[in-house]
Image (spheres, rainbow, N blue to C red):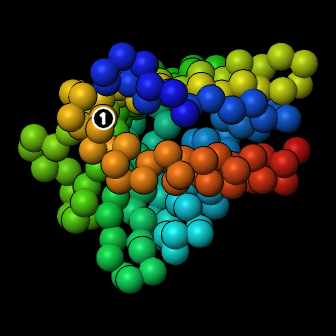
Amino acid sequence: MELEGDREIVIARTFNAPARIVFDAWTKPEHVSRWWAPRSRGVSVVTCDADIHVGGEYRYVLRLDTGKEFAFSGKYTEVLPYSRLVYTEIFEPTASGAQPGDAELIVTVTFDEQGGKTHLVSRSRCPSKEVRDAILASGMEHGMRETMDQLEELVGSLR
């Protein structure tokens, strides 16, 4: 994970699989539900809905081992299959739905395939440095590292 400027969080990983497989694992609900939550923290995905086209929406509801739920939701603004996604992301701490004024991130994910391997780069642009810093303070780096490991495991099983 790297920080760029005051507002961006960048995560990069190379997967030993073609872009088609990595893209599908990143977008299809039946796959996302298997990797998107850090298991070691007792988090599970309980709802995973995604309508992957420009203007389509997604919503992932996660549950802690305490029973508390929270969600991430947003809208796709660019979809180039196996190549690039751009979408908004809002954290819903109560899982009751996004509220006006919630901090909206813009996430750009690229899938660059070369030699049967795919280099994925996810850039999250936060509305402010304060929002970025709050995300980092929440333990996002550890969680992303673990979920990327889980994604790698899933991608390997889909080959």
Q: Position of residue 150 (x, y in %)?
A: 69, 55
Residue 81 in sight here = no
Question: In this orientation, which residue lies closer to the viewer: 96 or 132?
Answer: 132
| On-image quarter of the N terminus | top right
Q: Residue at x 54, y 47 (%)?
A: 144
Q: Residue at x 72, y 24 (%)?
A: 119
Residue 130 visible to an observer of this rendering? yes
Q: Nearer the viewer, residue 50 or 38?
A: 38
Q: In screen coordinates, is 91 left or right of 102? A: right
Residue occupied by mark 1: 132
Q: Where's residue 8, x and y in %? A: 38, 24
Q: Quadrant of residue 74?
A: top left
Q: Residue furthest bottom?
A: 66
What residue sits 29% from the left and 38% below the top?
A: 133
Up-down relation of residue 28 to residue 123 (above or below): below
All told, the count of numbered labels is 1
SS class, disc 1: helix
What amino acid is found at the position of numbered circle 1 in the picture?
Arg
Q: Position of residue 7 (x, y in %)?
A: 31, 24
Taking the spot 88% from the left edge, 44% from the top edge, the residue there is 159
Task: Classify 91 as above or below 114.
Answer: below
Would residue 24 appear left or right of 18 to someone viewing this image?
left
Given residues 126 and 156, the one toward you in this image is 126
